Amino acid sequence: MTLAKKRARSLEDKSFRRQQILDAAATLFQEVGYEGVSVALLASKAGVVKGTLYLYFKTREEVFLALYDQSLNRMSEAFIAQLTPGMSDRALCELLYEVAFGDGLYVPLQARLEKVIEHNVSLDSLINSKRNFLKQVGRIAAATATTLGLDQAQAIEFIKTLGVLIVGVAGADLAPSLEGEDVPDDIQALLDSFASKPIFVTNAHRILRGIRAGDSD
Amino acid sequence: MTLAKKRARSLEDKSFRRQQILDAAATLFQEVGYEGVSVALLASKAGVVKGTLYLYFKTREEVFLALYDQSLNRMSEAFIAQLTPGMSDRALCELLYEVAFGDGLYVPLQARLEKVIEHNVSLDSLINSKRNFLKQVGRIAAATATTLGLDQAQAIEFIKTLGVLIVGVAGADLAPSLEGEDVPDDIQALLDSFASKPIFVTNAHRILRGIRAGDSD
DNA sequence: TTTAATAAATGAACGACGGTCATTTAATAG
DNA sequence: CTATTAAATGACCGTCGTTCATTTATTAAA
């Protein structure tokens, strides 16, 4: 769990400590959310001091970018593992929803990736992250192509588009919880009408039909 | 332009000053973006001092929420004004894209609305904003229903869904500009493949076809 | 075994941030 | 002309992400 030595001098030691920090960040994120993860709090949970964090990550956002990369890898692995041959279009859309929203880190990080995280990250880190993204999209698309009988280009377009859709529908889940607040009926009905799952599944299905039909007009 | 008196004592004076601050915020937003609009900078541009801002807005985010409401109103008005009878499905999707992304404030604010802005706003302000949202969606949907020959329920679903799609596709536009940076070809191609307009128009069209077909499976 | 070289870890300090509030003072009513 | 009021002020607060001179655990050399 913890490092035997107090100083990480070898490369293995360093990557071990780096991962320690990431693990603490993942746990903390689930408890207090993105904005709640301050550098001071993260450092204390990781058992180091603030300055030490900056030996392992250039900025606070680089921590989140690394967390995002790992969550994307988990997500794509889980998706591919749960794909079953002959799965219906709808079942696949639902699986993708469950895997993406079930991870706990992937959706809130993806939703902040381009608007926030990427704005305080080195070009190198950004490029590495994008390369990993390309790789995971390729893996997911290949598995999807086989299951749904699409060609690879269709599957890539499908998966990329669903990534876009996930960010859109995630809005409702990332809005402040009004649990226990005195919300008028008309407003509550409006909020309910944006429940992420039905919107995602229905429209993922519509998009898939369009791709199958080969529309380009 | 500016208030004759140095103190705003009447209700008209107060709402005038409030709007002055909002105008300064809109201008500043276009220049420096969301994160660049600090309370101190906004105050100086509006010709007041920091503390004064808090007489007119409870928090920094309430400024952005008011800005969002006004941008949504502008947007829906422009959309309805430019609708023409007999417009094709595709033309309407393109018009909606142009109007939404052309405003300059609407898209970046909508993209941050639920994830950031609504988290630091009073319940009253939030409810008022949602009521305005409901009203504008109703107006846009009614005009769309007429133009496209949809019933009102279909049109409302269509417009709500396109709002979700806008937030998703906006990611690419809100990412940091890598203009002048040394970006490898594969990464540049990836970024280009997420250009917001074609993704929006193509998929808005697919969604519309699905709604027209009356899919619910 | 002792010493010198190294770089990992520290924590005090920085400027900028959003937000507060006792005080000042412009405008109004008597 | 005076008393009342509340709009405007600006000094101040705690917190934030980030930096860096200093300390010290670890390793290599003597």
Image (spheres, coloured by chain):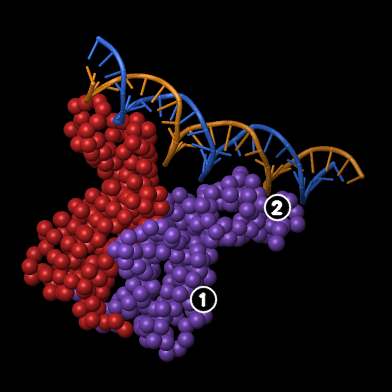
Chain colours: A purple, B red, C orange, D blue
x, y percentage for residue B162?
Answer: 26, 66
Residue under numbered circle 2: A9
Q: Secondary structure at mark 1?
A: helix
Residue under numbered circle 1: A78
Q: Give the residue type at disc 1.
A: Ala
Q: Give the residue type at disc 2.
A: Arg
Point 37% across, 62% down: residue: A171
Q: Earlier in the sequence, mark 1 or mark 2?
A: 2
Judge the density around disc 2: few (<14), some (14-19), many (≥20) Cα neighbours within 10 Å. Answer: few
In this rendering, the count of numbered labels is 2
Is residue B75 at least partly visible in the picture? yes
Between circles 1 and 2, the one closer to the viewer is 1
Is residue B176 at least partly visible in the picture? no
CA gap between label 1 and label 2 equals: 35 Å
Q: Quadrant of residue A211?
A: bottom left
Q: Secondary structure at mark 2?
A: loop
x, y percentage for residue D14?
Answer: 54, 38
Q: Quadrant of residue A4?
A: bottom right
- Position above or below: C2 against B184: above
